Image: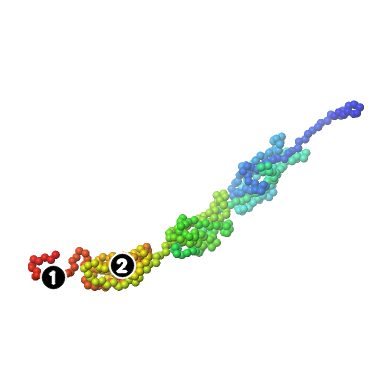
Amino acid sequence: LRATDSSGAVGSSPAFELRVLPVNQPPTFAVGTTTAVAGGVQSTVRALAGSPTTIPNWLSSVAAGPAVESSQSVNILLAGQAVSSTLFLVPPRVVGTALSFTFAANAPANASAVYTVSARDDGGTDNGGIDESNTADLGNGAAAPLQLVLEVATRNVAPTFTLGGPVSASVSDGRVTVAGWLQQVANGARPLSEVTATVAVNDTSLFSTQPSVSVATGALTFEPAAAGVASVTVTLRNQGGTEFGGTDTSNRTATITIAAVPPVLVLDAVSPIALAARTGAYPALRIASRVEPAGATLSLSGCVPSAPFETITIVNDTAAVTLRPNASGVFECTWRLTVGNAAVTRTSVVTVEGQPLPPTGRLAATALQFAQPLSNTTVVS
């Protein structure tokens, strides 16, 4: 150093050495581009018990500080909750930017461990230096302390159940309730109250109120609208999701058969029928005063003794019957009115008097009168 006084005299000091000492800057790190951070501070990672888990780029841009400190080494530290020997088979650690750990095979479902994340370099703290930082670059210009939450996940299992089997009803039944049709519902370790049920029907036109089931009571309800057979698929879903290959739905299928309303058949009492043998046409006789519904089929089921008629003609809607008997006597005959599978019967007595005409192709016994005596060569044809 040199000094000059007011008179211009110059003096100098002995030589000395001036040293500039380095001050360590804190390391920096950022979350990975695919790492979700809830609330800006917490990264939650779920994993199955007993399954090794590695997230290659959980962090990014890990650096010791300025470029002049690039030769320093940086370690990522996880601190906070003590590592439990019962929770982890391999404790969590971060090497480079990769996070890895393995929960114990018997780790309880939904158990968790919480850690604060920091980076530490080997630059030391001399001269007021800083070698550790827990502030992470969260992206979009935001920076904050980062927490890591590790949770034990489970592979969800769908609800199980059975159905009460096929259901039968009629169009005229109105609202139908089948109690206890949904049976043996189970949801594993999850609460049964979270299970929901949906019903899919292959033919919705058969119902005025579509089928539904209650998980709580097991009751099936619906209201028929038309006859037919419906395939009904019941699906139960829980809230466990499908993470790690789990399943949250199961289904079963059954049928609902809806029968048509049976027709109301009316066949008034059939009157006794009396026929006199004749050579000409027989009259049409109305055997009942009312036949319903229109289009129903009226037929003769049979008579006791066996049927005495060569030909039978019936006009259904008017119950008009033409009978051509081939035997005389008193017969008990049964008349049948049908629509589809529905039928009603009535019985009447049919009396045939005199000698009816024989079946077609045979001569009737007829009295012949001749004006003169017959010779031995007379031929009657």
Q: Nearer the viewer, residue 139 or 164?
A: 139
Residue type at numbered disc 1 = Gln
Q: Which mark is residue 369?
A: 1
Sort mark 1 into few (<14), some (14-19) or many (20+) by Cα contacts within 10 Å.
few
Q: Which of 275 and 9 is in front in this view?
A: 275
The image position of residue 215, as x and y in percent, is 54, 60
Q: Name the residue under label 2.
A: 320
Point 60% across, 51% down: residue: 153
Q: Is residue 241 above or below residue 119?
A: below
The image position of residue 36, as x and y in percent, is 63, 46
Q: Which of 68 and 173 is in front in this view?
A: 173
The image position of residue 249, as x and y in percent, is 53, 54
User: Which of pointers 1 and 2 lies earlier in the amino acid sequence?
Assistant: 2
| Residue 312 in sight from this viewpoint | yes
Q: What element carries label 1?
A: loop
Q: What element carries label 2?
A: strand
